[in-house]
Amino acid sequence: MDPTTPTIELWFDFASNYSYLAVMRIEALADAAGVRVEWKPFLLGPIFRSFGWSDSPFVLQKEKGEYTWKDMARQCAKYGIPWRMPSRFPRLSVLPARVMLAAGDAPWATPFAKRMMLANFRDDREIGEREPNERALLDLGLPAAEILERAGSEAVKSALREQTEVARRRRVFGAPTFFVRGEMYWGNDRLEDALGDARAGRPPR
């Protein structure tokens, strides 16, 4: 890995609808920009609870939720990304996040992330359950049982708790969130800005 390659951190939650857009778009855009992606799965639930929220703001505020689902349909059509309103939102996303952490820098992590996002927002699957995760891993030709066992280890469970705590300490308040040289960019619509600044080597503003 070339240490001089510009890097963008992608902080995302598999239950987050706007994270879905970013996960499906970032690989091609980053490759074109010559920017390396660091994948940072975390859980929004503990972040929201630290604000005193019992659920997603898209659930707690009816008007925001109604707007968001219309916006998702428009955005997915804009980017050519499939969309199906999930019958349960937000879904439990602990298991795919743990699998991503178990993957580390393995090349299958990115296609796994995309498969699990599609399982949630295209196929309306319960991504917190074992079967969709196992199916995604098997489809990638991977030893699913071995990886899922590792994902269920205390070490990986602890790593996900710590990753979520790091997000909180870095003042992450939603997903997706991007960091470029320590500078935060929030939201799928800031992905191109973050990649542009990473490629240009601009200092934080």
Image (cartoon, rainbow, N blue to C red):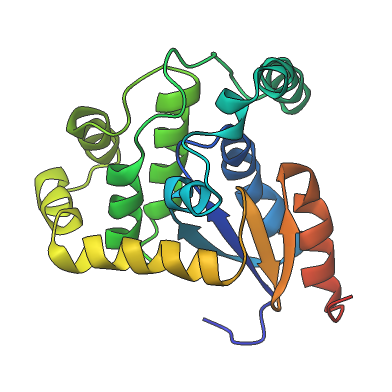
Query: Where is residue 53 drawn, in percent x and y?
Result: 52, 41
Q: Is residue 3 above or below residue 178?
A: below
Judge left or right: residue 115 versus residue 96: right
Q: Is residue 131 above or below residue 63?
A: below
Q: Nearer the viewer, residue 126 or 145?
A: 126
Q: Residue furthest front?
A: 52
Q: Residue at x 39, y 35 (%)?
A: 116
Residue shown at 48%/61% (left/top)?
A: 40
Q: In the rendered view, does 38 fall on the left or right side of 29?
A: left
Q: How many marks?
A: 0
Q: Could you tell me which residue is drawn at 39 percent across and 29 percent down?
A: 91
Against 145, residue 75 (above or below) is above
Residue 204 horizontal/vertical position (percent):
83, 78
Residue pictured at 23% horizontal, 42% vertical: 141
Q: Quadrant of the C terminus?
A: bottom right
Pinpoint residue 84: horizontal percent, then vertical percent.
54, 13
Quarter of the view holding residue 170: bottom right
Q: Which residue is outermost to the bottom?
A: 3
* Residue nearest the viewer, comparing 147 with 1: 147
Q: x and y percent of residue 131 in the render?
A: 19, 28
Q: Please tell me which residue lies in front, 24 or 164.
A: 164
**In the figure, 137 relative to 164: above or below?**
above
